[in-house]
Image (tube, rainbow, N blue to C red):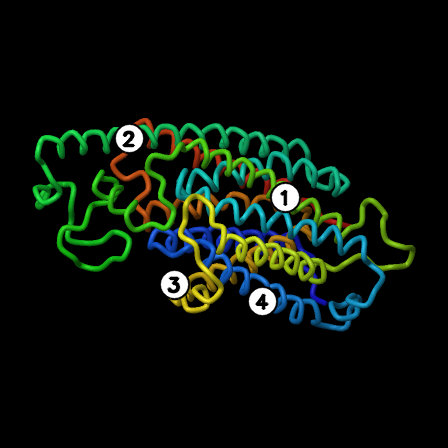
Amino acid sequence: MYMVESKGGAIGCMLLALLFLGTWPAVLTLLERRGRLPQHTYLDYSITNLLAAVLIAFTFGQIGTDEPNFLSQISQDNFPSVLFAMAGGVVLSIGNLSTQYAWPFVGLSVVTVVAASITVVIGTTLNYFLDDKINKAEILFPGVGCFLIAVCLGSAVHSSNTADNKAKLEIFSNEAAQGNCLSTLKGTSEVDSKDPEKGNDSAYKAKAGTAVFLIELEKRRSIKVFGKGTLVGLAITFFSGICFSLFSPAFNLATNDQWHTLKKGVPHLSVYTAFFYFSVSCFVVAIILNITFLYQPLFNLPKSSLKAYLRDWNGRGWALLAGLLCGFGNGLQFMGGQAAGYAAADAVQALPLVTTFWGVVLFGEYRKSSRKTYILLGSMLLMFIAAVAVLIASSGHRK
């Protein structure tokens, strides 16, 4: 079994996890914006998310002669720790599934900011005490404060951007009422010869950030948001944040047994064994919920079926890639957390820095927004940069 032992190795794992965990939401968002049903996407994602855990278990979990390795722990009497690991997988699966329905309403950037910040405020505090305070409190908790401020800024960004989009649509509606239909926009700032999402040349594609772009996006996407209250999206986001805040402490309990639930002489679960059970429960919950949503969909999505899902190859490769990115990202986070403390490993919750980059570059989020929105967005990202630096600086070393 391979173990990350150095502080530098732990930080390396955290940074790589940050890249992976910040990228997979952008991939799933891309598919939703192209019209693929989220149930189909999440079923594909769940398969490779589990595959990543299996690959990690049979490689890192079996490397070398140090015991206990992955296969030997499968037969051990460690059921209480297994339950903690599986409980973590359940709340993570529900949280990930929830965010998939929140992104269309609130936007990729704001959802990840608010959910990640709630995760840090609650989850990092729990992990600090579970880890016997190995992280430096005088550094750690100012970092938690930075994330809390980021929650407030994220909500403000969402409110400001929503007002901007409403104003754009009202202006366009007034112009349309006066006879200025879409065809009259040729050659103006509302349209361009390039599709900002697909990158293909096609005449009169709307420029990102314009009213026409918002209208065309609404027509393509699978979850329709026009006319629906954005408070629904924020409520889902806060719910997912609470779910996310519990999975890391549960995993911490599974690997370190702070509550002494294991029988005397039974080794603690290794990171790799715990991650395997964690991912199995995550997979089972995702399959049950998404098969249910195929036949009883949320938010007036069209009904589907297992047969229709199996035939839907449009974007399947991207969904499978997203599952691998998330799976390896979670595994790296836990490997780093076991070495440097799970509270410090919550620095990966700065993943909105990555998702915001993809949101702006791929999806045109915040294009042609007001100055107020740009100032709030910049302040939010700066607060996140400060927060991740502080949390990494609080890293300790597990004895």
- Comes first in the chain, label 4 or label 2: 4
Distance, label 1 to label 2, CA atoms, is 40 Å
Is 189 rendered above or below residue 85?
above
Residue type pointed to by label 4? Leu
**The quadrant where residue 242 appears:** top right
Q: Which mark is residue 51?
A: 4
Mark 4 in CB contact with mark 3 (< 8 angstroms)? no
Distance, label 4 to label 3, CA atoms, is 19 Å
Residue type pointed to by label 1? Ala
Give whichever of 229, 280 is nearer the camera: 229
Q: Position of residue 352 (x, y in %)?
A: 46, 43
Circle nearer the viewer, 1 or 2:
2
Is 92 rendered above or below residue 68?
above
Q: Which mark is residue 166?
A: 2
**The quadrant where residue 392 appears:** top right
Secondary element type, mark 2: helix
- Comes first in the chain, label 3 or label 1: 3
Residues packed near mark 4 inside 10 Å, few (<14), some (14 to 19) or many (20 plus): many
Circle nearer the viewer, 4 or 1:
4
Secondary element type, mark 1: helix
- Comes first in the chain, label 3 or label 2: 2
Residue type pointed to by label 2? Lys
Circle nearer the viewer, 4 or 2:
2
Q: Position of residue 399 (x, y in %)?
A: 78, 50
* Residue at screen point 11% across, 40% down: 181
Secondary element type, mark 4: helix
Q: Which mark is residue 25?
A: none
Q: Which residue is mark 1?
A: 344
- Comes first in the chain, label 1 or label 2: 2
Q: Which residue is mark 3?
A: 315
